[in-house]
Image (tube, rainbow, N blue to C red):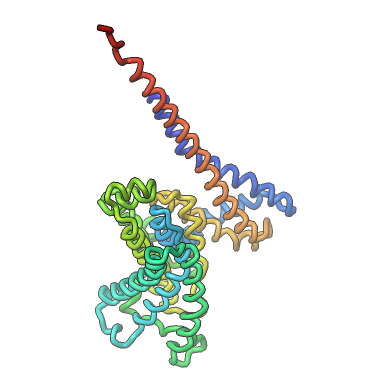
Amino acid sequence: MNQPLLRRIALTAGAPVAAVAFALTISSLALIVTGNNPIAAFGDMLENASRLETFVDILNAATPLYISGVAAAIGFRMNLFNIGVEGQYLLAGFFAAAVGSAGFIIDLPPPLHVAVILLVAMSVGAAWAGIAGTLKVTRGINEVISTIMLNFIATGGIIAWLILEWKDDSGASASFGTKEIDESGRLPNLNGLLELFTREVSKGRELTSVIFIAILVGVGYHLFINRTRVGFDFRASGYNPMAARAGGVPPKKMVMYAMLLSGAVAGLVGMFEVLSDRYKYGDSFVQGIGFNGIAVALIGRNNPAGIAIGALLFGFLSSSSGILQITGSATPEIVEIMKGIIVLSAVVAYEVVSRIRTRDEAKSAAEATTRMANDQPEEVSA
């Protein structure tokens, strides 16, 4: 193995390792400052993660985070900052639950019923993200501003009104929101499959089948970005928009494709609640996954495998919050501090590695140019 290859491997592995080491160091200092023992805190977190039930919790928490991370990464590939994943999945989740529980839908066979719910979620998410894309290509409005505003409109306006208008009139105590989806529109849990290789899952934990949807999203994202012409245009536009335009790539069309696809994937984020947890949209519908997904995408460098690692890491930290409170080894807030430190560390580490690689490439190009110049035969005078 030659030296340049070893250096490339070291740079690739060095960024995440340095980020984790830095995050652990700063988190340890934060624990010491707050009067806690970092060894005891990290020990409790690792011991808790070794339990099967905690493993299920981690996977369940990582599943929507992964989908959200891919949705954000699609925009990042085009140098678009889609902050609207939060509003997109909340609005999509509401309409998917509402349509999925409607009377004219519940008589469908189970596969078709689930397919309709997924199609509605993706369509609503794409349409809501498409508004930001349209504003950018027609009026030049920055997608950061438009998606932030659309988040407020979706959560504080449309959903706040619809959740009262389109409510469950069954007389149940928690009547706000949609009706529960019928059995034909629900995905079974994967406990039986997991227990084939482990033991019985206790404490009411259920591994969501939406993890298969997340896997399909990750595989589809990889194939689309790396194996299709449109994906190549995405990457070309993200790396160098001016060169891509000169090569015949229509920038406005790429912006719309990116926003629509990002929104469609974002619409699937809430499916773990609609299809396999609460089977409805209510006032307790989970929030915050869209913003955490952006952090997961940054940690994973928009790579499907890297995003998976980031989602599992965040899932692990989320599951550790409760055990720290129970054991008293640290306050649960330290988990949020660690998340922020990890994101910051990853961004800084990857930027440092990127600059080193740029310097190495420039040095290699200069050396190659020098060699070519030296290899040229001297001109013989007449």
Image point (31%, 78%), residue name: 184
| Residue situated in front as seen by the camera: 345 or 27 | 345
| Place of residue 204 in the rendered image (x, y in percent of width and height, measured from the top left) | 48, 70
Q: Is residue 60 visible?
A: no
Q: Is residue 13 placed above or below 86 in the rendered structure?
A: above
Taking 192 as reference, is 101 above or below it? below
Q: Nearer the viewer, residue 164 or 114?
A: 164
Dividing the picture into quadrants, the one containing residue 262 is bottom left
Residue 34 left/right relative to 243: right
Please identify the quarter of the rendering in which residue 348 is found: top right
Assign the N terminus to one quadrant of the image.
top left
Q: Considering only vertical position in the picture, is 203 above or below 7?
A: below
- Left/right of residue 138 with respect to residue 15 in the rendered view: left
Identify the residue at image location x=43%, y=33%: 8
User: If the image is split into quadrants, where does the C terminus sit?
Assistant: top left
Provide residue 158's location: percent of width, then percent of height. 46, 80
Residue 361 versus residue 222: which sits nearer the camera?
361
